[in-house]
Image: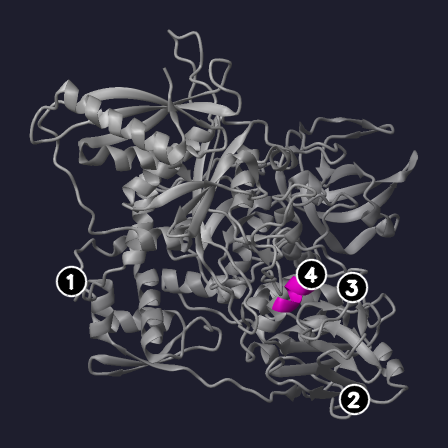
């Protein structure tokens, strides 16, 4: 949010440099991201460093306050005039200008009241108002249509205030100092219009600070200065408002308060310059005095307003008294809003209506039918309060985000409505004239209870870890607007209306108040101490510990963890199955759909981790030649008749690209990843988690390459699938190289993990190594052969590893040769060659008998 310092100063005195103020606000939780200087030089404060600003600094001698005393016609140009400017010198300076807003004063002689403006003398540096790109220029004397000109009266664009260049700056009246003394002509413009705008990045919990007054309250507390409230009184000289309008609230829980005031016989015209300037500084476009006042109050005190054309309301009521009704939509109702969009209303959208239909989307945006126009003379002003959750839902579902909705969606107290409507109607009267009706129509069916919290000084010390005198704590809370009653070592704290972030729960409310004390005292001033409190009881969390162990194993294997959104779309997950392929294992499970999705590509909860892994790989393949990633997270399956879905944990793996870069002494790179790499990761994971009895079987999973993938099976239950991604799936995801993936039931795998595993001591005798090659049928799984080898080898066979598969002319067609490396060893003695040969003979005989295998010569 943009907050001009000059506007803050209207409510609180600031006697420290702006940079130091920004630092204090940031430390207190209101992060000042940028300081935008308007004409002023950047200040430097020891210990505080802000990014260097490259703004235009107004020269104190050459850019000054000017008073236009007369506007003469140019003798040779109808589109130019001669402005006679008093700039504090001995005589008036003649400026040749084409500013259209000076033409109404042309040829009328000396003006009774001067036009106060910004004057730039020769040599002044300003922005080029006629350049499309930002470009500075220095004023030099030259002739303009025959008349020598060496100075100028400036527009906002030329001073760097805004992009406005349709006319020169004309102030409504002679500007004055903060104590009411008028600035004379020739006063440096820095002193009159110079400003610094704080760009504050507010978090949603700081709803109280979404206004200049809210920020001023924080400044007053931090600097220990009194706060000056704006005036909420209004001059009401018209007929009583009773009988001229009425209010009906149908859903008090969604609309706790609604107020109306009436201004008659006003004039819709441009706002005064001071109001327009402030609105521009906070990023608003001035429209007219009525609309500008509603925006001004929104930013000044944080209470959004809405203005209706009263005569249009009365015409819709058939000439009768308009009745404003707040209710939920009826079936099929629509609304044309001020942003020229026709909206289909949803059942939860709270509306402002009359007896003829819908007027506006409550708390968010007005309707087009009753908007203020140049012909408006009678204004009905609304200040209401809305349920913040409902406003948030409405903004999301209708895809409309406004300044009013931003504030209501974070929380505005109902007490602010009566303040906003009073200040707003008076500013409308001051800027457009007219008479305000006596009284306010105030429908307030659900006033919230005042929150009172008992705060014990011992709790302050316990949470902050430092002792503070109770009087100091009371002083800091008082500076923040809290009312206190001291009772020995306890304070009874009454929470002000605007502090909706303070909980009414006695325990949580105490913590909230202590946080406020810490903010004002200064987080940076709290000493570092060792925790001095009872530790909570520690409980074993086996599921989490095993999950962390899984992460550690995978990281040690060279993989990196990713964390992705758990949202996707059915269409995106459908890409995991090639066209014409068999259905995915989750095809029959219904999706859990989002009632209010945050984006069009996040409409349901996922069924598989593969989509997020593949999307990550696609996004990173242009930066990395090799990718080795994993993700641990839940997938979601809808359960019939159940409110909550099934949420099993899954582990997803993906490796793709090159195993590594070519070494400087080598001629070839290590090569690309293949099926055995992902198989090795899976085997290392199984071994590291001490899961026994897992076998690998050929799979028919549609997302995997047929023949280059396998299921992990234990006790007849499939724990997961791994292998090469189906080429058609990889092509659909636009992968540049083959990907080898795995998706594992992490819950099932960790349940099978054996915490009480046996370990072996290091061997004390040398091993005997031997290779064996067996010819088996082509369709025989290598795992079946390995199981026979291990069973036949007995205790003396310590290890057996498949290291080669051969198919070729030297063996019968339809067969393959599987070569295994065998390790024989025992701690009882050193094995002899005869013993190793005996074991080998048993293995060959068992393979021939049980598998029909033959020893390859």
Disc 4 target residue:
400
How far apart marks 4 and 2 lie (CA) works out to: 32 Å
Disc 1 target residue:
532
Query: Which badge, 1 or 2, is on the more N-terminal residue?
Result: 2
Please say whether residue 722 is one of the residues in the magenta stretch.
no
For residue 37, what is the image quadrant?
A: top right
How far apart marks 2 and 3 lie (CA) works out to: 25 Å
Count neighbours of disc 3 (C-alpha within 10 A) and say few if under 14, some if 14 to 19, many if 20 or more: some
Label 1's element? loop
Image vertical order of residue 737 relative to residue 477, above or below: above
In this view, the mark in front (4 or 2): 4
Label 3's element? loop
How far apart marks 3 and 4 lie (CA) works out to: 11 Å
In this view, the mark in front (3 or 4): 4
Write the start and end of the magenta stretch as one range. Answer: 393-399
Label 4's element? loop
How far apart marks 1 and 2 lie (CA) works out to: 65 Å
Residue 425 position, x and y percent, is 69, 75
Farthest-out residue, left: 828
Q: Is 177 on the left-hand or right-hand side of 694?
A: right
The image's mark for residue 338 is 3
The image's mark for residue 244 is 2
The answer to whether marks 4 and 2 mark residues whose Cβ atoms lie closer than 8 Å is: no
Please say whether residue 395 is one of the residues in the magenta stretch.
yes
């Amino acid at each position: 949010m943009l907050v001009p310092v000059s506007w803050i100063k209207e409510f609180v005195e600031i006697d420290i440099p702006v940079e130091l103020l920004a630092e204090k606000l940031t430390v207190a939780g209101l992060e000042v991201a940028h300081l935008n200087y308007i004409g002023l030089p950047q200040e430097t404060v020891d210990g505080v460093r802000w990014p260097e600003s490259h703004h235009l600094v107004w020269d104190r001698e050459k850019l000054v306050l000017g008073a236009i005393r007369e506007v003469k016609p140019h003798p040779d140009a109808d589109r130019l005039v001669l402005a006679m400017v008093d700039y504090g010198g001995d005589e008036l300076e003649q400026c040749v200008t084409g500013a259209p807003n000076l033409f109404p004063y042309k040829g009328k002689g000396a003006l009774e009241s001067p036009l106060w403006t910004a004057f730039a003398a020769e040599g002044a540096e300003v922005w080029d108002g006629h350049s499309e790109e930002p470009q500075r220029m220095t004023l030099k004397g030259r002739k303009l249509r025959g008349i020598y000109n060496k100075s100028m009266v400036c527009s906002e664009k030329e001073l760097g205030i805004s992009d406005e260049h349709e006319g020169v700056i004309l102030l409504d009246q002679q500007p004055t100092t903060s104590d009411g003394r008028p600035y004379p002509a020739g006063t440096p413009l820095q002193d009159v219009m110079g400003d610094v705008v704080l760009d504050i990045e507010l978090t949603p919990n700081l709803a109280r600070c979404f206004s200049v007054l809210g920020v001023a309250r924080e400044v007053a507390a931090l600097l220990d200065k009194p706060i000056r409230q704006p005036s909420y009184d209004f001059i009401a000289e018209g007929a009583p408002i009773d009988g001229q309008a009425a209010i009906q609230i149908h859903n008090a829980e969604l609309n706790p308060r609604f107020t109306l005031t009436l201004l008659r016989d006003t004039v819709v015209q441009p706002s005064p310059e001071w109001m327009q300037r402030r609105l521009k500084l906070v990023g608003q476009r001035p429209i007219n005095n009525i609309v500008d006042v509603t925006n001004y109050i929104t930013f000044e005190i944080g209470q959004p307003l809405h203005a209706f054309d009263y005569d249009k309301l009365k015409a819709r009521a058939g000439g009768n008294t308009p009745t404003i009704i707040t209710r939920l939509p009826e079936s099929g109702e629509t609304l044309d809003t001020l942003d020229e969009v026709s909206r289909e209303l949803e059942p939860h959208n709270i509306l402002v209506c009359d007896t003829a239909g819908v007027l506006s989307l409550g708390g968010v945006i007005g309707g087009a039918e009753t908007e203020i126009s140049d012909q408006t003379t009678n204004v009905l002003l609304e200040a209401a309060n809305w349920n913040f959750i409902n406003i948030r839902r409405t903004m999301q579902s209708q895809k409309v985000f406004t300044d009013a909705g931003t504030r209501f969606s974070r929380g505005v107290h109902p007490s602010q409505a009566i303040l906003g409507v009073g200040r707003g109607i008076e500013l409308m009267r001051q800027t457009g004239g007219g008479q305000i009706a006596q009284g306010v129509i105030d429908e307030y069916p659900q006033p919230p209870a005042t929150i009172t919290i008992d705060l014990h000084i011992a709790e302050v010390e316990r949470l902050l870890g430092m002792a503070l005198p109770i009087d100091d704590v009371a002083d800091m809370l008082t500076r923040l607007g809290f009312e206190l009653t001291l009772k020995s070592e306890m304070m009874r704290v009454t929470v002000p209306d605007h502090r909706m972030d303070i909980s009414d729960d006695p325990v949580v409310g105490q913590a909230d108040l202590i946080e406020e004390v810490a903010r004002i005292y200064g987080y940076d001033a709290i000493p570092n101490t060792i925790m001095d409190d009872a530790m909570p009881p520690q409980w074993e969390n086996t599921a989490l510990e095993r999950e962390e162990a899984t992460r550690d194993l995978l990281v040690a294997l060279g993989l990196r963890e990713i964390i992705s959104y758990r949202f996707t779309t059915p269409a995106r997950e459908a890409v995991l199955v090639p066209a014409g392929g068999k259905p995915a294992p989750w095809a029959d499970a219904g999706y859990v759909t989002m009632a209010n999705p945050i984006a069009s590509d996040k409409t349901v909860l996922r069924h598989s981790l593969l989509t997020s892994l593949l999307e990550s790989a696609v996004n990173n393949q242009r930066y990395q030649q090799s990718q080795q990633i994993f993700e641990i997270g839940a997938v979601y399956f809808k359960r019939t008749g159940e409110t909550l879905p099934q949420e099993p944990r899954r582990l997803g793996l993906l490796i793709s690209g090159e195993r590594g870069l070519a070494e400087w002494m080598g001629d070839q790179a290590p090569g690309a990843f293949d099926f055995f790499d992902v198989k090795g990761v899976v085997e290392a994971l199984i071994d590291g988690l001490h899961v026994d009895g897992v076998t690998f079987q050929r799979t028919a999973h549609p997302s995997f390459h047929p023949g280059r993938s396998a299921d992990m099976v234990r006790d007849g239950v499939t724990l997961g699938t791994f292998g090469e991604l189906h080429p058609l799936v990889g092509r659909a995801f636009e992968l540049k190289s083959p990907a080898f993936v795995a998706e594992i039931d992490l819950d099932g795998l960790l349940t099978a993990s054996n915490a009480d595993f046996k370990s072996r001591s290091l061997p004390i005798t040398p091993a005997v190594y031997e290779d064996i090659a067996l010819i088996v049928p082509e369709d025989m799984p290598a795992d079946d052969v390995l199981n026979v080898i291990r069973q036949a080898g007995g205790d003396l066979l310590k290890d057996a590893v498949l290291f080669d598969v051969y198919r070729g002319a030297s063996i019968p067609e339809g067969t393959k040769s599987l070569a295994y490396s065998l390790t024989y060893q025992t701690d009882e003695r050193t094995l002899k060659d005869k013993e190793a040969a005996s074991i080998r003979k048993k293995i060959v005989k068992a393979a021939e008998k049980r598998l029909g295998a033959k020893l390859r010569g």
